[in-house]
Image (spheres, rainbow, N blue to C red):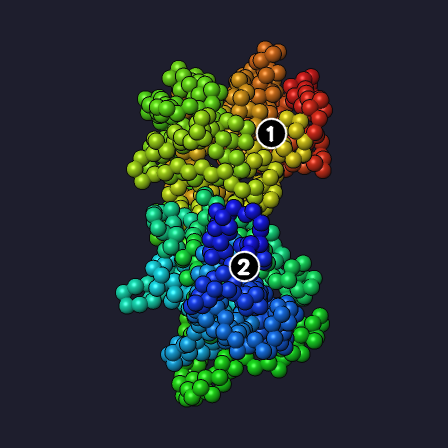
Amino acid sequence: MTILPGADPEFIESLYLRWRDDPVAVSPQWHAFFSGYELGRGIPGAEVIPPELAAKQSAVDSLIYRYRDLGHLLACTDPLSPCKLEHPLLALDRYDLGEEDLDRTFHPRRFLKKEATLREILDTLRETYCRSVGVEFMHIQDPAVRSWLMGRMEPVRNRPAFSREEKLRILGTLQEAALFEEFLHRKFPGQKRFSLEGGESLIPLLDAVVERAAEHGVTDLILGMAHRGRLNVLANILGKPLENIFAEFADNEGIVGDGDVKYHKGFSRDREVAPGRSLHLTMAFNPSHLEAVDPVVEGKCRARQDSAGTGSDKRVLPVLIHGDASFAGQGVVAETLNLSQLEGYRTGGTLHIVINNQIGFTTLPADARSSLYATDVAKMVASPVFHVHGEDPEAAVHVVKLALDYRQAFGADVVVEIICYRRHGHNEGDEPYFTQPAMYSLIKDRPPVHELYASRLAEEGIGREEIDARATAMGRRLDAALAAPPGPVPGGFEGKWERYRRDYAPVSVETGVSPDILRDLAGRLAAIPDGFTPHPKVAALLDRRREAVEGGEGIDWGNAETLAYATLLAEGVSIRLSGEDSRRGTFGHRHSFLYDMATDAHHVPLAGVAAEGAAFHAWDSMLSEFAVLGFEYGYSVEAPESLVIWEAQFGDFANGGQVIIDQFIAGGESKWQRVSGLVLFLPHGFEGQGAEHSSARIERYLQLCADNNMQVAYPSTPGQLFHLLRRQMKHPFRKPLVVFTPKSLLRHPRCVSPLEELAEGGFREVIATGAGPDKASRLILCTGKIFYDLLERLEQEKREDVAIVRVEQLYPLRSDLLGEVLEPYRGVADVAWVQEEPRNMGAWSFLRPHLVAILGAEPRYVGRPENDVPAVGSHRLHGEEQGRIVEDALGADP
């Protein structure tokens, strides 16, 4: 008998092998055929397989598949809703099965045993997939991964046996979570704490994560989470001193800088997990942009993994705790998931825990997402998702251990969703009955989770004394901590940060490199390996770069930048550069990776000049600003000894990462005492390319500047960039550095530097050129690219009566140096500030009061008038506008 006349036996054999690996990988007809074939082979003496039996076996296989695929729809995971009893897609009659088949023996593939009755099969399937745990995993395309999960879930029916000690430990952590919240509610009434009440199962779950992680050899666990339950996690998992938490509630804790609200703060400590063995736990600081911390945690983990070396992805574990509304609603979640398997950003898999309290502030799920589950976005990276009943702590502990085992086995993300509720409103001063009266009528009379679990243990024969022991001890700890003074607060300059100063020191740093070293490095960077065929234009570029250094003239932007990297690498400094198209450079000026025209193999010249222990990594990022910038910020916080750079494709595109810029880069030190040396490359310059390809929004960064929190620079020559990058690593402190980099100047014939500019001195915050004080009738102050437009006009007209002062560092503004440079020009009648940006943009608004203070009068403004967009999209109009600016600056007396 054949079901495909004329079929090639080899084709049938290939289908058969595919079916044996994964029964659902072939059509239902072939599935029935192969099921019957194997069934026939397994019956001694059988020569003919009864068609009815083959059909029944195929039906059972389909039913098993459906339970694995759809059982989560029947799972009893919501404490506020009655359990579903049936689903039409799981009904027996849908598969031509009936009550008469329940005691018939079948041969389920990859199931509990070789054979089982349908009743036994259904019982196992329902217990595994339709009780307190609902599992989504059949969307995973790898059959081996699905088989691994089935083998871990079905034999124990997602309900392994816990020992008496394990159950008491689970109960104890629930009691500690509940008593902590109750204590805060009594002692500090009305204060916001974003209570975990209703979701207390998170605490035994995280306790199990710590213990299981230690069993797997994890040495560092980095947590990221928003405010809901954060204080509880800090107290009961990370062990933050209760005295310090209570001091924050009483508002009598000493702070440095501006500080932050208590439920945004981070903490770290070593937690002993076995005699002589500890696990370092870190809670990352997080602003109210709930999911913004996700990529920051990933970057911190990657930095630790890179530092630790091979195999460290198994030893450094990122754990992200989300809310249901934010996990579904905030785009950075999807961006961070998309980073998970990319070479430059992967961290060996992340354990995601979603606290689903079924409401977002006052918004119900029907208004918060278009998907069935809050976790559906995780399916984009084929993550298994475990939905667990929030009042079944044993189930929660079981699935999170399984989830962590999965992460360690496959190096991939995994999601555990605790479906629970929020006992109070969004915060403790909120009234939830205004908007969800029906839901809160159910919640009001619901016993706390620890009481439900205690009753269950009492029914199992555990005595009341044992049940109450840990709660009694916790009560004593809380009372004692309230009466005790707070302990010292870590200041963020411990460990690897001890060698760095807290304060900004405006001192000159010598960053020149000897000509011999620069020539040697230039030669090594231009060398092509034998048998490697680069693009002819790239080969010519490398030769020109080498010749420019050897000849001592004409070093362009890309050459100076590469030499800055090379000199730092040779001195043992690692470099990480990341951004969209950063390896080549958006404008084709960098070419840090060379590609063989015949084989696509790549060669990285900078890697060959690095000293032992240093490394150069450049990564073409995914098309993201928010997540990638957050990742690089997190990396920089963990790697102060490395030069970490994020490059925007165009400066305007940094708008997409504005949350990271505002909340972490600009304010992280003041709020949290967490310092970063991250460098932002933001291409800037007006060339008639429209509003989105012109401005890096200089004004926005300057508005964020205060208390020496950042450095903002607009270098005008390649030599200046060389010294600026080297200075970033030579400074005795770390501050974020925003660099406005060029586009058209990358190939401008005048935007070059001689070798001596790189070999001597350092970065100059202020540069004066042109007429001296005795000849100048006009003084121009400017920054960046506009200098070359002014210079070209002066040279055309052979003018020698104009002095130009370039402000190369906009913040911290070196008013002392600027004053020294301007002092001799006090008698000049016409003083102007010139910029190509509109009047309400650029550096004018920021510099204006400083210039008035230095000059004693307000300089004349020259630039584009105020506008609601930065630039025009017409080359003709741009040229006319640019011409007017130059004419206004240098033409007839105003």
Q: Could you say where residue 574 lies in the image, as x and y percent from the top left? A: 37, 39
**Picture quadrant where residue 873 is located:** top right
Q: Does residue 415 lie above or below 846 as drawn?
A: below
Tell me which residue sits at (61%, 37%) in the image.
652
> For the residue marked with disc 1, what is the amino acid?
Gly
Q: Nearer the viewer, residue 98 or 471?
A: 98
Picture quarter with the N terminus: bottom right
Q: Mark 2 points at which residue?
A: 33
In the rendered image, is residue 674 in sight? no
Whichever of labels 2 and 1 marks the residue nearer the N terminus, that label is 2
- Quick one: label 2, few (<14), some, or many (20+) residues within 10 Å? some
Q: Could you say where residue 18 lies in the image, as x and y percent from the top left? A: 49, 53
Q: Does residue 567 lie above or below 544 as drawn?
A: below
In front: label 2 or label 1: 2
Give the alpha-carbon distance from disc 2 to disc 1, as whole Å.
68 Å
**Picture quadrant where residue 69 is located:** bottom right
Q: Point out which mark residue 685 bears.
A: 1
Tell me which residue sits at (36%, 30%) in the image.
567
Q: Identify the secondary structure beneath mark 2.
A: helix
Left or right: residue 332 versus residue 38 is right
Q: Residue furthest left?
A: 276
Q: Could you say where residue 381 lies in the image, as x and y percent from the top left? A: 53, 52
> For the residue marked with disc 2, what is the amino acid?
Phe
